[in-house]
Amino acid sequence: MSGKLDSTAHAAAVAKISGLAAHETEVRAHLDEIVKGPAFKGSHRSQAFLLHIAERALHGDPEDLRERSIGISLFGRDAAYDTAEDAIVRVTASDVRKRLLQHYGTAGADARIRISLPPGSYVPEFSFPEVPIEVPAAALPAPPKFKRTLLIAATASLLLLVATASWLTLGRRFGSATATGNLIQAAFPTTPSPIQVVVADDGLVLIEVLLGRRFGLQEYENLEYLQTPDLVPQKGIEKFWRSLSNRAVTNIGDLQNADHMAGALRAHNREVTVRHARQMHARDFRSGSFIVLGSSISNPWAALFPVPESNFPYGQLPTPGLPEVILNRHPQNGEPAAFQVHKDDRTGDKITYSRVSLVQNLTNTGRVLLLEGQSMSATEMSGELLLRPDSAAKLRKMFGLSAGAPLPDLEMILEVTEQNEIGERVELVAARKLVHRPE
């Protein structure tokens, strides 16, 4: 994302492109298809950005793929330009990520090569899946014009950040991550059953914003939230409602998280499937291991796994469209009594948080990892931190565990810095072991 990228993560990203020159001809042909395809049509800046970072990966110095270097070499910025004030590199990178996902969900569905730009990095990743990605094309229609200004703003802002979950190739390979020792792998050291990554239902969030109310797990499981309300014919939004009702919708950050987490686990021979929350049933959670992306607001299945004796419970749920407040029952030195979205008075950056929990499944036969961000960027950046090569080692050191020791059930708070709704950096600010009281 930004030039402030963690140096360890940057080094790991650079290491992944070694040997790319052997595929140069194929990569260049694939790049030509992408920039001429419908996903990048009309965006010369995003086309140039993708070609620039790919060329640096092939023949330049990938160490130069940092915010300031790109701003200078590609966008002609002065060497001393203020990256905090000029977000052209971050904004363009975010646009390229979205367009790449759109490309592989439509025109590039059968491509042998997959190019991605991981969250928190400007170094592109190139993967060569063994099985071609077969994804049906789908697009969410634009929302109709609502009469209420607040409804327009809330719904439109969410629609700009969502993508149809049919872009996912559920259960297939997305490529493989080679990092070792990250928290995703450490959370599931050995498991005989497949690990299911369950992405959030942002169609549900749109419905909640539209109706101004929340739906609990039982209402979600019974599909009560899909019953057509009186508001729909009153506002003349039947087509929009049918789209929300019939399509599985998730956000870009969840797609990227699912992609990279699945790759990290498959690199250690774990069987992984990726499913949308709307495709799940309660019986699917009776056994096995899971990664659940999103809080109970966007992914109601998270409510199946309450954190026992949580030190970081949620406060009272806010109005739909507003972020939750995470409480801190026993603040340690320097920790606040609550983690809530706010603006940094010194930098003007937006600060958001994510709660990450590792607990047992319903039958104590597997583990469940819950990623619950106060914003889409918070959840997205949480995945980036958990996939860092040294993330498990740092957590073990914090808990006083030996190298390679199994991780206990735990909960963590991650702090995310955002600029223009784009995640800039993420760090672990609080962690606790979960203490299970005898029944």
Image (cartoon, grey):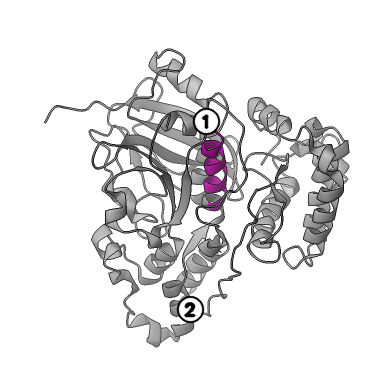
The answer to whether any part of residue 77 appears in the image is no
**Tag 2 secondary structure:** helix
What's the residue at 69%, 40% (across, down)? 84
Q: Residues within 10 Å of mark 1 (few under 14, many from 20)?
A: some
Instruction: Give the left or right position of residue 273, taking residue 64 as reference.
Output: left
Is 263 positioned to the left or the right of 89 in the image? left
Residue 304: % across, % down = 27, 48
What number is the disc on residue 256? none
Question: Relative to residue 271, is residue 439 depicted above or below?
Answer: above
Q: Is residue 359 left or right of residue 23?
A: left
Q: Residue 167: x percent and y percent?
A: 57, 61
Q: Is residue 264 magenta?
A: yes
Q: Which residue is nearer to you in this view: 186 or 355? A: 186
- According to the picture, the residue beneath numbered tag 2 turns out to be 240
Task: Tell me if I can see residue 76 in this picture.
Answer: yes
Check residue 427 in the rendering and tell me which mark sits there, or answer none.
Answer: 1
CA distance separating discs 2 and 1: 39 Å
Q: In which quadrant of the rendered image does the N terminus lie?
A: top right
391 lies above or below 351: above
User: Residue sitting at 46 percent across and 14 percent down?
Assistant: 403
Q: Amino acid at mark 1?
A: Glu
